[in-house]
Image (spheres, rainbow, N blue to C red):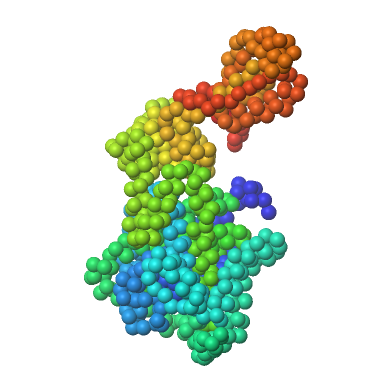
């Protein structure tokens, strides 16, 4: 099937016609996503200090509510690993221990209090969407968000390693990381075997899938269950008993298995109501705002990411999606479920599995409902160590070393923000940590010359308007903290009034990484609406790195000065070749000189020479050097040197090429910048 052709002729929509037309695609994808979601829902719920079935309640409710309230066609709603830290923190604040010592009355009380917190946060999310505040997700700087997610990954790993090894542990993430050697020494060998085998499967199965593409239909979590459940049966975890290994006695029993109902339809016995009295306590409200802010941010970012992956480039109404997430969370909290968001990993699997409409999310919830209603006894046989292994893998992906390298490529200042946020979250909590990350970014902006008055209020004015294309000129700064009002103005003039936009940034002191990334997204938004959005004026800015989305600061820019000394007879040939390769200009003047050859063979008599100088970009200088070494030096004597120089405008040394392109049957001309 040609996705491009379908883009133009038959964009799938989640209406009644789409339900019937794409039934096969959506059911198959829903089934495959269900296989991934089932163990993850259980694992996330247990790691959050909730009953295991709470995560499945969330996925079921989310799939039904979001399908009919949201217009996001391919996102999968459900519990997410990113909220584990908040959930377990809230449980702990109300006296629960996350079932470290078994489920107690204190855990039940903390669970019901956390559900009340979830209701309050959900109401805030609904209001957030109704007041069209979904754009606030644009405020947070990208590097701080990535640092927060990496910290969440580290926390998940720290908390799940003891579970995978069969030992009890509590404490903050830094304390847990220090105790890892002790956890290994005290590990229960049988449980650790299940945990370690499961971890190996999670890390190695994707490699196997690359070697054998036909196995991609079998997700890693499913393979873990296929292996771990028989291992648990082999160790007879259904019955309490002990065994001796190397003169040490270890205990085994059902406490190492997932707690689930013991009969068909037993799930309805597990429905739990919130304890709203908890909201009268001051300690509840920091967690309300943490669920609200972090949950909303993660959901918005995931929904935006899924839009970019959508083969048909359908655009989600973020305000409507936030109302759907809030309504889903309200229902989840009232029934005893975890908070939910738009979940990126399951959504990506949904796309890869060929889903067409939002009904794939519905079907994944239907399969979960059938499973937990009819075979909860089978789910009870899942070892918690296997679920911990899945979460360790999830945490590793969030805090993967390549995340550090990716941020480093964007700029050293972005790595500082990333690391500061990561460490701050580990040392404090999510809200304080990301606040410190944002403050760090503000300090860096001020040190780069951004005026304080322009941090939150952009200076942008309409300078040209021919009725079809509007030129907006920005001044002072274009940074994450003033991007929202800038974006609103661009959208109102461009997307609402249906006009093309040229954004002139030549008078801006600094354009940060977040805004560079958002400008790229804006180009896609305009393109989807049949309009154009172009950014100009960055030629006089120096990029912090070679990354396309790195921050740019106005000032001198690094360039290369290439100086060639050679025989005047090949001057014209070199000049012609340089222009052909992309040189925008050169300087040539006659001179006298003697090289090693003249000194050795002609007594050092100076000869007529020509000296050619060109200033070019780093990339072009390498092309010129390759040309001289490959095509000129074998037949002609010449010398050349390369020096680093600083120039006021790098665009003065790059060629402008007029290019006519045809788009949708109309000929337009645009400037191509090399």
Picture residue at 68% right of the left edge, 29% below the top: 626
Camera-side residue of 28 and 486: 486
- Establish if 374 lies above or below 537: below
Quadrant assignment, res 217: bottom right
| Residue 625, x across and y down, in percent | 65, 27
| Residue 74, x across and y down, in percent | 53, 58
Instruction: Tell me the quadrant of the picture where the C terminus can be found.
Output: top right
Picture residue at 23% right of the left edge, 67% below the top: 282
| Residue 99, x across and y down, in percent | 40, 78
Residue at the far right in the pictured view? 635
Residue 136 visible in the picture: no
Camera-side residue of 107 and 34: 107
Residue 541 visible in the picture: yes
Instruction: Tell me the quadrant of the picture where the N terminus can be found.
Output: bottom right
- Establish if 449 lies above or below 225: above
| Residue 577, x across and y down, in percent | 68, 21
- Establish if 427 lies above or below 439: below
Quadrant assignment, res 600: top right
Picture residue at 32% right of the left edge, 65% below the top: 287
Number of on-image labels:
0
Picture residue at 51% right of the left edge, 36% below the top: 532
């Amino acid at each position: 099937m040609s996705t491009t052709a379908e883009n133009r002729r038959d964009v799938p929509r989640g209406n009644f016609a789409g339900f019937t037309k794409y039934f096969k695609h959506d059911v198959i994808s829903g089934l495959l996503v269900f296989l991934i979601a089932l163990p993850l829902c259980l694992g996330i719920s247990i790691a959050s200090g909730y009953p295991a079935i709470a995560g499945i309640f969330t996925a079921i409710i989310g799939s039904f509510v979001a399908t009919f309230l949201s217009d996001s066609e391919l996102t999968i709603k459900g519990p997410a690993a990113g909220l584990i830290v908040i959930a377990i923190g809230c449980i702990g604040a109300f006296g629960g221990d996350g079932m470290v010592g078994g489920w107690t009355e204190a855990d039940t009380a903390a669970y019901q209090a956390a559900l009340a917190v979830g209701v309050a946060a959900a109401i805030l999310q609904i209001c957030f969407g109704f007041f069209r505040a979904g754009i606030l997700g644009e405020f947070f700087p990208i590097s701080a968000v990535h640092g927060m997610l990496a910290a969440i990954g580290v926390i998940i790993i720290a908390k799940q390693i003891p579970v995978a090894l069969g030992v009890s542990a509590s404490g903050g993430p830094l304390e847990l990381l220090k105790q890892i050697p002790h956890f290994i020494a005290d590990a229960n060998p049988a449980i650790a075997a299940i945990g370690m085998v499961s971890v190996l499967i999670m890390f190695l199965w994707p490699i196997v899938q690359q070697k054998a593409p036909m196995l991609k239909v079998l997700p890693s979590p499913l393979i873990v269950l296929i292996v771990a459940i028989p291992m648990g049966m082999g160790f007879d975890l259904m019955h309490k008993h002990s065994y001796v290994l190397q003169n040490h006695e270890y205990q085994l029993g059902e406490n190492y298995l997932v707690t689930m109902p013991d009969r068909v339809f037993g799930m309805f016995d597990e429905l739990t109501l919130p304890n709203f009295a908890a909201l009268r306590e001051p300690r509840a409200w920091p967690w309300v705002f943490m669920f609200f802010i972090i949950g909303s941010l993660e959901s918005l970012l995931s929904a935006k990411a899924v839009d970019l992956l959508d083969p048909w480039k359908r655009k989600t109404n973020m305000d409507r999606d936030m109302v759907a997430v809030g309504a889903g969370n309200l229902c989840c909290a009232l029934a005893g479920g975890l908070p939910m968001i738009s979940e990126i990993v399951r959504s990506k699997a949904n796309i890869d599995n060929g889903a067409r409409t939002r009904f794939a999310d519905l079907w994944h919830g239907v399969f979960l409902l059938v499973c937990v209603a009819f075979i909860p006894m089978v789910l009870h046989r899942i070892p918690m160590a296997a679920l911990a292994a899945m979460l360790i893998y999830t945490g590793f992906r969030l805090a993967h070393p390549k995340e550090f390298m990716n941020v480093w490529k964007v700029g050293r200042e972005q790595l500082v923000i990333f690391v500061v946020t990561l460490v701050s979250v580990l040392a404090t909590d999510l809200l304080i940590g990301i606040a410190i990350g944002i403050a760090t970014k503000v300090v860096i902006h001020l040190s780069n010359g951004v005026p304080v008055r322009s941090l939150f209020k952009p200076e942008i004015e309409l300078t040209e308007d021919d009725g079809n294309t509007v030129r907006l000129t920005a001044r002072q700064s274009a940074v994450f903290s003033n991007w929202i009002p800038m974006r609103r103005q661009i959208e109102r003039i461009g997307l609402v009034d249906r006009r093309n936009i040229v954004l002139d940034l030549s008078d801006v002191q600094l354009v940060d990484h977040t805004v560079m990334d958002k400008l790229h997204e804006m180009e896609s938004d305009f393109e989807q609406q049949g309009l154009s959005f172009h950014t100009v004026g960055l030629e006089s800015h120096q990029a912090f790195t070679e990354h396309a989305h790195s921050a740019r600061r106005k000032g001198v820019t690094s360039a290369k000065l290439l100086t060639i000394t050679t025989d005047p007879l090949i001057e014209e040939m070199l000049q012609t070749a340089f222009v052909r390769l992309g040189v925008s200009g050169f300087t040539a003047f006659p001179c006298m000189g003697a090289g090693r050859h003249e000194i050795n063979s002609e007594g050092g008599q100076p000869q007529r020479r020509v000296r050619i100088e060109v200033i070019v970009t780093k990339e072009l200088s390498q092309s010129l050097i390759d040309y001289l070494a490959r095509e000129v030096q074998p037949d002609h004597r010449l010398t050349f040197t390369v020096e680093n120089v600083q120039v006021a405008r790098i665009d003065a040394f790059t060629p402008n090429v007029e290019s006519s392109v045809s788009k949708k049957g109309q000929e337009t001309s645009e400037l191509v910048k090399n």
